[in-house]
Every structure is written in C-alpha cells, then in structure tokens.
Image (spheres, helix red, strand yellow):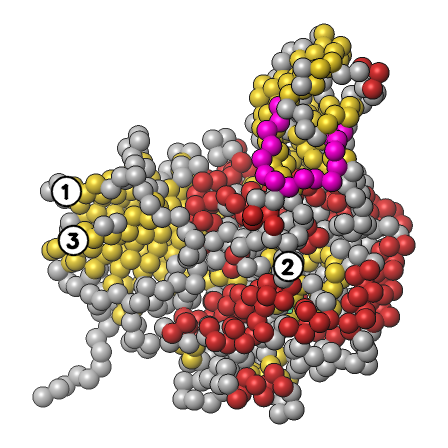
Amino acid sequence: MILNTELEYKGNLFPSKIISYKKDVDTLYFTSDNGVVLQVTVERDSVLRFRFTTTSIFENDFSYAISQYASKGFNKLEVSEDDENYILTTSKLICHISKLDMRTSIFDAKDKTLISQDELGFHWEESHEYGGDIVKMSKSTFDGESYYGLGDKPVQNNLKGKRFENWVTDSYAFGRTTDPIYKTIPFFIGLHHKKAYGIFFDNTFRSFFDFCHERRNIASFWAQGGEMNYYFIYGPNMSDVVSNYTDLTGKLQNLPPLWALGYHQCKWSYYPESKVKEVTKKFRELKIPCDAIYLDIDYMDGFRCFTWNKEYFPDPKRMVKELAEDGFKTIVIIDPGIKIDKDYSVYQEGLEKDYFCKRADGPYMKGKVWPGECYFPDFTNPEVREWWSNLFKELIEDIGVKGVWNDMNEPAVMDVPGKTFPNDVRHNYDGNHSSHRKAHNVYGMQMARATYHGLKKFSYPKRPFVITRSAYSGTQRYTSTWTGDNVASWEHLSIANAQAQRMCMSGFSFVGSDIGGFAEQPNGELFTRWIQLGVFHPFCRTHSSGDHGDQEPYAFDSNVTNIVRKFIEIRYQLLPYLYTAFWRYANEGIPILKSLVLFDQQDSHTHYRNDEFIFGEKILVCPILEPNAKGRRMYFPRGNWFSFWDDELVKGGEEKWVDADIDSLPIYIKEGAIIPKYPVQQYVGEKTIDELKLDVYYKLGKEKSQVYEDAHDGYDYKKGRYSLRNFTFVGKKDAVIIQQYKSGKFITEYDTFQLNLHGLPFKIEKIMVDSEEFDMKKLIIKDNTLIVSKEFTDIKILGKK
Ligand code: GLC
C-alpha cells in the first residue's frame, strides 16, 4: 500500500566513491557507486572540461557558447592512480580526482603548486518543480585570492565578497547594486599567489556565483537546471586565461569596418528626416568628427520592425544615400517583438511559417513591447534565424543602411513582473527542445547572431556591423555591445569604466556605454568627462533617452564643444592604433582594454585597482570621475610612462597626483612604444592617408610595437591583403635603433612615415637609414621629426649624451 505519494526532499546529494574508470582518447569517464558520471576532457594542455551527470546518461552535448573554431589538442596526457586519486597529467596541469567522492584538485605541472581545489565539489539537489537537478559546485579559496570577470556586473573590478546572479534582464537606470542586468557571461578568473586560472560554467539556466560572500573561504557557483559543465582554464598569466577563454567561446568572426571605430551619435529618437539632417549638418559645420548616425524606434511605422514611417522618412533610400555622401553611415534599431497585426507582412509570414514562440500548451507567447502586443520569433530555431537574416535584404541591400542595433532582446516584455517571458515558453534550442528557463539567457544572443548573418549576407562585399544589448558568452563572435540604459550621473561614469574593463576581461571587447548617460541629463562637465573616457572605449557612441534635453557635443556650451572635439579628434588620430588592438583581439583574443591587474598581475598593487586601464597595449588612461576636479591620484603600473600631453616622464610602481583640468585627462604612453596616428578626419575615408605618423617614445632597453592595416573594410585581408608592421625599438644611452619587419600583401596608400622621437636623452648627431646617412638638414630639430620611407628596415639614431 502506498502511504506517501510525495517525492522525498533529499537536500544536497553528493557523488559517492568511484567504482569504474575508462578512457576514450582525450576523455576520461569516472562512474560513482551512486550513478554519477564525471567526464573530464582535455581540450588543451591548459584547458580541462568537467561534466557531471547524476542519471548516468549525458544530455546531448550542445552549446551556443563554444566556438566551432576553438583550438583543440594537447602535447601530453598521462593517467595514473595512487590509493586516493586518479591523476591526470598534461604538460601544463596535474589534476587529482578523489576516488572517494570525485572531488578534484588542480596543480601547476611545472612547480606543483595547488591552483584550484574543490571544497564540497560537485553536488546537487533534485528539482521537484521542474525535474532534473539544481547543480552546484564549491571550491576553496586561497590566501589572498581575488576574483574577476562575469561580464557586465556594475561593481568594482575585484569580485571577492560578492554574490551574483545571471539572468539577462532589461534594467533601465540600473545601479551599482542592481543584479542581474543585461548580460550573462558565466566566466570568472581567480588569482592567487600571482597565478591566474579561469572557470567558464557553460550553463544557460539562471545561475549564481558566490565569491566568499556566503562563506569566508569558499567560492561557489550553481544553476537552476542543466548540467554541471565547466571549463577550467589555466594561465598562469591572466591575459592567457582571457585569450584562451576567448578562443573557446570565439573570436570576432571578422574585423569591424574601420568606420565602426569612429564616433557614433545616437538619440531616442532623431526624427523626422529634417532633424537627422540638422544633427549631421551641425557635426560637419562644427568639424566634430562623426561616422554614424542612429535611428531609434520612431523611424518605423508604428514600431513595426522592417518598416518606415513614411511621414517622417518619405524616401529613406535617398536620405541614407545623402547621409552617406556626407560620410555618415545610417544605423537602425531592430527589436525582437513583432506587432500582432494581420496586415503586417513580417507578422503574417512568422505566423504562417510557425516561427513565433509558444507557451507550453500551444498558444503563442504574447507580450507587450513598444508596438503594443507582440509575438516573438524563436531565434533558437535555425530556420527562424535564416528567415530573420533574410528580412534585412531591403534595409541593407536596397536602402543602404550600414548597421543594425538589436535592442530589447533579453527579451524584454513590458508590464509583467519578471520583465520577460514566463518559464513555460517553449524553444527549439537548435533541436534540443527546451523551456524558457534554459533558452532565456541565449535568446538575445541568437537574435544578434541571426541579424549578423543577415548583415553579412547583404552588406557583402563590405563587413557587417551589429550592436546588441543582451548577450551570453560567445556573442562576441558576431556583434558589438553597449551596457544598456545607464544614468547621467558621476556614479554611472565610474560604472561605465568598470563595465567596459570587465567586459574586456570577459572576452567581449567591442563594448561601450551610452556616453553622457541614457536616463536624465548630464551637465557639460559630466558630458565632457564621459567623452574623455568614451573615446578610449572600443565602441564609442553618445546615446540618450531624449526625454531630458539634447546630448550632442554641441548641446552644452562652446567650451564643452571644443574639448569634446579635441578628444574625438584624438580618437580619430589613434584609429590605426585602435584598429591594431582590434586585430590582436580578433586574432589572439587579447582584450582591447586591460585592467591593471591584467596588465601586471605580479604587482599586487594592481589587484584592487579600478579606475586606470591600458588602452590597447601601450596607452595608460585614467578617467576623471568626480566633478570640479583639477586632477586626481592615480596608480602608475611598473615601468616608465610619458605624459601624452607634454612628454613628462613618470616612474611607475606608485600612486601619484596628476593634474587634469577639464580640458585634459591623464593619458600616458609606455616607454619604448611606437604609436601610429592618422590625420584628423571628419569621418573614416574622408582623407587619403598620405603619411603615417609614428610617435616613438624613448626607453633604455627594448620594446616591440605593431601596426596593422588593411583596406579598412571588405574581406581581402583574410586572403593576406593586410599590412602588419612589427617594430623593435632598442634604446641605448646615446643611440636608438628602430627595426621594421613587415608582413602581408596590402600596400598602404602612403609612402612615408613621419617619425616623431619623444624623450630622447641625447642630442641627435647622425642618422642612418638602412645604412645610408640621412640628410641632417631634413631633421626638424625642435621636435625631433624626420620623414623616412615606409620600407625602411633599420634606422640608427646616434647622438652624444
Ligand atoms: C531601450 C534601449 C535604448 C533605446 C530605447 C528605445 O531602452 O536600451 O537604448 O533608446 O529602448 O528604443
């Protein structure tokens, strides 16, 4: 007789002792007495994947995050055992798996130091509500351990002492303590004893991370469903951890067109056409460089995606063309909600083809967004993505729009408690049918992916440009991103700084904030300080809700306009430098911004620094984050740094006061650096680059720099039509040697370099260019400037102390 029909609540459950073990090429399987299987795969010598099942059978192995191009292969895999452990050894790691309970410990193979150790290790709770398990992992914290990463969390760099949730959420006017917000990047970096490792928990359910918040010496992570499935990525250099994570989840599939690195102007909303033209005209009149102008939701007919409001924009094709003639690329917003309207073709087609998301029992998922009641395409269905990508044909191919901005793709739903779909909504999940609990965090990513494919197709032979608000790990392959609806406040300026740095160390470098703040209105000073930071972010766009007044660089006073212009001009001059950083990011996964800890983890002063960062490889920037500042204290990382403004030399490794009145910002160049510069242009391509300026900064010693160039758009660079200049600088007491090694088939338009030598400790007496004596009459002595052929391989600058 059955007395109790309720399922028993068993609390936390743990694997018991291992009873069998098998090896299949790169993967080891351990089975416990109570039916848990641990699968350990050696992805690379420094990357191990751990997967657990409690039912003895694994789910279909499918991930939206992992790139098909992720590097695989290792040099060594040995498995041995002692009384207590199975021992797996690669050339970088030694992993112990306890025979008693499957707990793991990971050591550096070289010096045998312990890097990571399970506390409780894998454990789980049965989910009676949804079936499956709530999967959990806890690890011990080491002395002095710091934690970093997790995408867009709006807090200080070091995450120690905090707990976070991952569930992408529309978060208008979020603050320091708002969690979760727009993105889910379940990847963190641990750093202790100057060694760094990363953990990527590839689970799309609502997940949580606790870094010594609940318990002092414990870091844990768990998810409300799915598998315990994580990658352990060893450094010991933090930058290797980040680039290996980026390799795993994917690098930019193509470089952005150079214009996308220019300045972008946006507002909710510029309409009608005359208003758009008024703004673009003003930029040109005032000579404020700008490459892109955005149309927010009001360009559409009743907020129906892929339509135009013909009253405001009677002839979009003509307008877009005219804007293009003036150097402006038009970017339009596209949201996921499709208005329920039987006369609207996108709606009709979606309905006919059965492409909209449905609730558990079959009705459509109906939700309110800007257009009113909407249905939502299921972007986790490959057929829907294909359909969606084809919807861009007219916008891109015919009208000439150059970029698409995907918003509200968490997906955001208005006037409902969770601000999104209910859990029971069904998704295709690329054939792995799921509920919204599993698909929520990737919905926006799949929308951006479909958009990217549409743009790629219809922009061809030019490169696509997409920007998304919501993202899951791996979204960086397809699109750029911004940090959502921030606020025009000083606190938010500092949040923007933290978020951009954190996104970069979480594999997603093409990022920026709404400059000046989306909600509310900045004063001229705040706007100026924000521009000064924003021009050093990989994505640089002013955007505002428009409810609180104008936010163009000229909307304040002429002093603001002049300073803002000056800083945007600096960005345009630095475009070849930034483009090189993008190339490095796309090729090697090296973040475009580096928090100081990423730049020099050996210096423990950097572990808790937040404000200063390295832009690219060689430029140190420290934003001014307070009103009425005439300067601030900042930390200089080890090494010597030259002031960008006056070449003053600063010795690093300490905190110092730096002056920075409203028209200035602390910017410093690493000694030995060679910084390429283009002339100021009002937009990319306005001028022919007839000379490349190279600012060369002296160092006693050696330093390498690179300059990457190509056609700035198109795909020829993938066929070898690029120009990569590798420079080696060697500085002695009375001489400087600069060597150049070039690769790639692209021929730049310019023939010469203008070399500016900064900080030379000697007077130049003689210059040899490729063993020929340089005519000293041609040296501009005042600022040590000389013009040389771009083909030089070796320059010797000789002097007397
Ligand atoms: C959302 C976006 C914002 C946009 C607005 C209207 O709030 O985050 O950038 O301007 O919607 O489309």
| For residue 709, above or below residue 165 | above
Question: Mark 3 falls on what kind of element?
Answer: strand
Residue at position x 32%, y 52% in the image: 49
Q: Could you tell me the amino acid type at mark 1?
A: Glu
Residue type, numbered disc 3? Lys
Q: Of the numbered discs in the image, which one, if any, rests on residue 721?
A: none
Q: In this view, does 727 lie above or below 749?
A: above
Q: Are marks 3 and 1 in contact (CB under 8 Å)?
A: no
Q: Can residue 415 be seen in this view?
A: yes
Toward the viewer: 541 or 24? 24
x%, y% of residue 670?
63, 29
> Which numbered disc flags the more N-terminal residue, 3 or 1?
3
User: The magenta stretch spans which residues?
Assistant: 739-756
Q: Do the residues labelled 2 and 3 touch (CB within 8 Å)?
A: no
**N-terminal label among 2 and 1:** 1
Residue at (59% x, 78% y) in the render: 337
| Circle 2 SS class | loop
Q: Quadrant where the C terminus lies?
A: top right
Residue that mark 3 sits on: 22
Residue behind mark 2: 461
Q: In which quarter of the image is the N terminus?
A: bottom left
Q: Residue at x 67, y 49 (%)?
A: 712
